[in-house]
Amino acid sequence: MKRADKAVSETVGTLLLLGISISLFSVLYVSVGTIYPASSSPCVNLICSLNDSNITIEHRGGKDLDLQTKFIVTINGTAQTYVVNDYLTSKSKENNVWNIGERVVCPIGSTINKVVSVSVIDIRSNSIIVMADLQK
């Protein structure tokens, strides 16, 4: 008689372990499956140049960028943040995006014997699109 009780006990224990395992796997699957992937940075071709006392950033291809895209200009270690919307022409702002052929011209003053670098940051993906050191 004791032998039959052990067999039932082992079967119930196995079913309980199997049920717990399936429940834990289901909870893990649902929690991981609902995580949204981070947005990737856009593929854009930007050309940065330095002439006289202006930095020019021209959009040469790829995805359109938001007008609130930021660019950081660092001169001899001092950084200043700018927004693309403030430096585009009114005609360029009509479609509410920064797209191919449009350029940003930002006056920065004299750059003689100074180290100048530019970083363009996409606000949607919160990623750096371009990072460049400029020399005259």
Image (cartoon, rainbow, N blue to C red):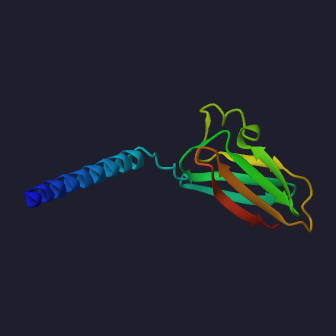
Residue 98, position in %: x, y?
62, 42
Report the residue at 69% width, 53% height from top: 120
Q: Is residue 112 above or below residue 84?
A: below
Q: Nearer the viewer, residue 28 or 24?
A: 24
Residue 42, position in %: x, y?
54, 51
Report the residue at 87% width, 55% height from top: 53
Q: Nearer the viewer, residue 9 or 39?
A: 9
* Displayed quadrant of residue 78: bottom right
* Displayed quadrant of residue 83: top right
Position of 74 compared to 95: left or right? Answer: right
Q: Nearer the viewer, residue 116 or 14?
A: 14
* Displayed quadrant of residue 115: bottom right
Position of the C terminus, as image quadrant, is bottom right
**Number of labelled discs?**
0
Position of the N terminus, as image quadrant, is bottom left
Position of 78 compared to 7: left or right? Answer: right
Report the residue at 78% width, 45% height from top: 82
Residue 29, position in %: x, y?
35, 49
Q: Nearer the viewer, residue 108 or 24?
A: 24
Residue 2, position in %: x, y?
11, 59
Q: Residue furthest front?
A: 1
